[in-house]
Amino acid sequence: MNIFNKNSNKVLWLTAILIVTLFTGCSDDNGTVNPPAVGTTPTVISVIPEDAATAVPINNNISVTFSEAMDAATINTLSFTVMGAGEPALTGTVSFNDANNTAVFMPGRDFTANTAYTITITTAAKSVSGKALATNYVWIFTTAATADTAAPTVMSTYPADTVTGLALNRNITANFSEALNPATVNAASFTLSDGITPVSGVVSYVGAIATFNPTVNLAASTLYTATLTTAITDFANPANALEANIVWSFTTGTTVASGPHAVNLGTAGDFVILSKTGITNIPTSDITGNIGTSPITAAALDNVSCAEITGTIYGADAAYTGSGNVSCFAGEAADITLVANAVLDMEAAYTDAAGRTLPDFTELYAGDISGRTLAPGLYKWSTGVLLDGVVTLSGGPDDVWIFQVSGNVTLANDASVNLTGGAKSENIFWQVGGGTGVILGTNAHIHGSILAEKAVTVNTGTSVSGRIFAKTAVTLDKNVISATAP
């Protein structure tokens, strides 16, 4: 019997309506059809204060930066909660800055001194495309006994004052002594001029680093002046502003650099090794530069002795004992703040490197770059990366390489990364998101700054010309670590 009778078209039409209804959304209690959420699931990429931070000023604000644009209406005191130990939820106001995807919680009163606070961003927080956080995001910090009344200062700038020969396509940055109110860092408070005409550009802010990105390349052989105004404030409540305008000048050269803009390390650049959970070492290593850990206790640095380091060891407290000689250790209050800020800058640098878009090379050689020669550029892999034999980075002194690796990085035994054409270690960045991290085999050598989501393991006899930054542990075994080439 033919089931497709004269009513077949009506059946098919009703079926199509049902299918469209099922796949385009579901209705709420009022019968309104809600379209399904599209786009990627948002994530939290950085927070201030950081997780496990201690000695947080009692008048601090709290911020959270998301991976993408968020629906500001969903970021409120219901989805962004602050709870002190043994206290009811803290009242306050929440604002959202679309320019940098950052939400700020301003408490209605000071935090209680010497108290642990738990902050939660719930799955009620959604992106502009309607995607919610996959799970609640929770972190904890502990307050100090006092408020922040100190004005922020500028620790360094890029380029530095009076520099000459700057590449024409580079950003201008400033590194601050503490976290700032993101809303105060903008095109009015951070300006660039050739002395006559203001330069058009985009101002952004991450961690404690402000960036001015010119709309077009700068003019050749030209003197420029950058200015940061007193409209810039820190993250305290009430806020502390810059005490005076900060002004510096530099002169461009005639060349355009290849590759992306360099990753700004901020005050992390003053360290050769940074870790959040400790540095383990089998002696004797040879370390040139400062090292530090935070927030873990300074006792997690005891495996590194003063005899092995040309520099200073910084800790989150005064618990370093080393081999009994503590002459290289700095653990006073100012030193604890210094290394804590450096770790914040380390995390901001990781976020910067991981967030770069429009890669020049994607999934190159399926992640096995053994024996290859690589030009400057932004490289992206969704897998791990293997380096065996000799890997050559060929480019000029202003050129930049950023390697975004979702998996782990493995440098084989006796392998090496070599530089040609004047390329510099300081312009090479390995951003590694894998669950294990970075494993450097025995008697190997690598150039560049390693920014690892997890651990970095450096096996026997291997040397690093660059920096090692890990959000978990760093393990050394008779290594040579220096920010400059040996």
Image (cartoon, grey):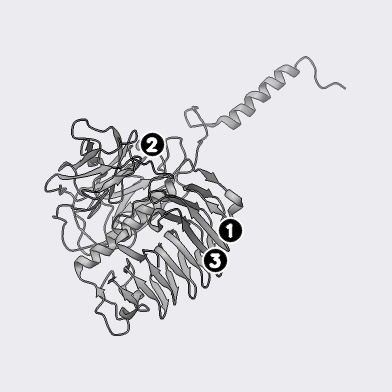
- The x, y position of residue 9, in whole percent, is 73, 17
The residue where tag 2 is placed is 71
Mark 2, Cα crowd under 10 Å, few <14 / some 14-19 / many 20+, is some
- The x, y position of residue 268, in whole percent, is 32, 59
Report which quarter residue 475 is drawn in. bottom left
Name the N-terminal-most of marks 2 and 1. 2
- The x, y position of residue 77, in whole percent, is 31, 44
Mark 1, Cα crowd under 10 Å, few <14 / some 14-19 / many 20+, is some
Q: How far apart are the two marked residues, 3 and 2, measured between alpha carbons?
A: 48 Å
The residue where tag 1 is placed is 371
Q: Secondary structure at mark 3?
A: loop
Name the N-terminal-most of marks 1 and 3. 1
Extreme residue in the left direction: 243
Question: Mark 3 is on which residue type?
Answer: Ala
Which residue is at a point 34% across and 48% down the rendered structure image? 64
Front position in the image: 242 or 100: 242
Question: Mark 2 is on which residue type?
Answer: Asp
Seen in the picture, residue 259 relative to 22 is either above or below; the reply is below
Name the N-terminal-most of marks 3 and 2. 2
The residue where tag 3 is placed is 415
Q: Is residue 291 left or right of residue 444?
A: left
Seen in the picture, residue 111 relative to 20 is either above or below; the reply is below
Q: How far apart are the two marked residues, 1 and 3, measured between alpha carbons?
A: 9 Å
Report which quarter residue 225 is drawn in. top left
Q: Secondary structure at mark 2?
A: loop
